Amino acid sequence: MAWMDWLQAQLSPYPWAWTAAVAALLLLAAWLANWLTKHVLLRGIRRLLRKTVYRDAEHDSDVRMSVIPRLANVVPALVIYAGAVLIPDLPPLFVSVVRGLCQAWIVLTVALSVARALDVVNREYERRPRAIDKPIKGYLQVAKIVVFVLAGISVFATLIGAEFVHVLTGLGAMTAVTMLIFQDTILSFVASVQIGSDGRVRMGDWIEMPSQNADGDVIDIALHTVTVRNWDLTITTIPTKKLISESFKNWRGMSESGGRRIKRALHIDQSSVRFLEKDERDALRRVALIDEYLDAKRAELESWNAKLEAAGKDPVNARRVTNLGTFRAYALAYLRAHPKVRKDMTLLVRQMDPSATGIPLEIYCFTATTAWAEYEGIQSDIFDHLLAILPEFGLRVFQSTSDAAFAAALSGRDATAPAEAAADA
């Protein structure tokens, strides 16, 4: 080109000026190739895919952030790799280093693109109805490990100027010795990579790992250890490899959901469970939350019992309202009306199997906050109220201290009579 000959002639008095000018032109060409690839070629490909293959926004987002944009990063590296030899008066060693770095960048970019392509394959496969029965994520993760290992060996061979096959052979001979000497470090490194890639543990997560006496927040993630500050302010260090070989509980899902579970039972004294008489049902109407329940039950039971009466059945077969069922309906209505209980999450009051400690009536719901102190306050307020209103339904909480003697005294019987009779025997 005439203008380049003219520029070279103008810069001939300055030995390095022409070299710098050609290098600047090469960098400008690399930038221009990158800009054209990303703003023209990729935009056209996206529009084509949007009109043909991917018609919904979710797929379009996947295309934007997946394989093709990563591969576009190869273009400027190819331009610099091809043009480095054209820059005059550069030391051969410098040219070799630049070309080697370009090769390493290309290999790394291709490896990342292959890994992203495998993620897209897994995501598309998981859309299939039977994907849950035959997942392929594990196989794809193995494939990604192989790709990254080969890419790492290739980058290393390129940077030291050796042949890929020679480096691979040498590493194979050194593998046994290396794994024996650096076994813990290798396991910790693999664990750190896996933890970092799948996000199973992050800084600030609340994790619970009883086998390591850990129950608190993660405050540090290092190569060999993960440090946890327990709730009693003690510090526990967990070997990083334990987090992929042993089970632990991560409470991050609870924190991100915005609701924390309440799962606690009131143990009702079985002897206090009975049918409610009509006057007792009428008296409970002053409890506003169960008016609808009582009306629905009255209509249901009147219809049922009318059929029994018409069939000539004994009145003992009639259905009646119990105080425990009414209290269960009240507890459920109370939770639904509570401003600090989540209505969009599981909310129920259920009766568990009777046992020697009474009938467990379990409260299962989620608070509208995950903060520990506020959560405990909401839970305590709920059970304070339920325990206090329980006698209004003629129910008692079971406790194994002096309930029997107290009940006997109320009924006019001598609570010591059984003991005296046993002593006489």
Image: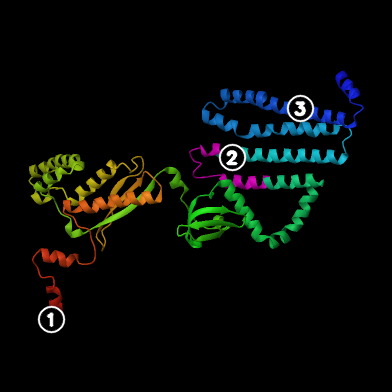
Check disc 1: other Cα within 10 Å, few if <14, some if 14-19, many if 20+.
Answer: few
Task: Locate the N terminus by quadrant.
Answer: top right
Residue 28: assigned label? 3
Quarter holding residue 102? top right
Residue at (76, 27) in percent of width and height: 28
Name the mark nearer the viewer: 1 or 2: 1
- Residue kind at label 3, given as amino acid type: Leu
Name the mark nearer the viewer: 3 or 1: 3
Q: Is residue 119 above or below residue 372?
A: above
Left or right: 362 with respect to 84? left
Residue 424: assigned label? 1
Is there any visible trace of residue 425 in the rendered image?
A: no
Residue at (73, 31) in percent of width and height: 75
Nearest to the observer: residue 27 or residue 272: 27
Left or right: 231 with respect to 262? right
Estimate the x, y position of residue 388 in percent, counting from the top left: 22, 53
Estimate the x, y position of residue 93 in percent, counting from the top left: 86, 41
| 2 or 3: tag closer to the N-terminus | 3
**Segment tinted magenta in the rendering:** 123-147
**Total marks placed:** 3
**Which residue is most to the front?**
13
Q: For numbered disc 3, what is the local secondary structure?
A: helix
Residue at (17, 40) in percent of width and height: 291
Residue at (89, 21) in percent of width and height: 5
Q: CA distance from mark 1 to mark 2?
A: 81 Å
Residue to which mark 2 is pinned: 119
Tell me, yes or no, whether the highlighted magenta stretch contains residue 125: yes
Left or right: 104 with respect to 324? right
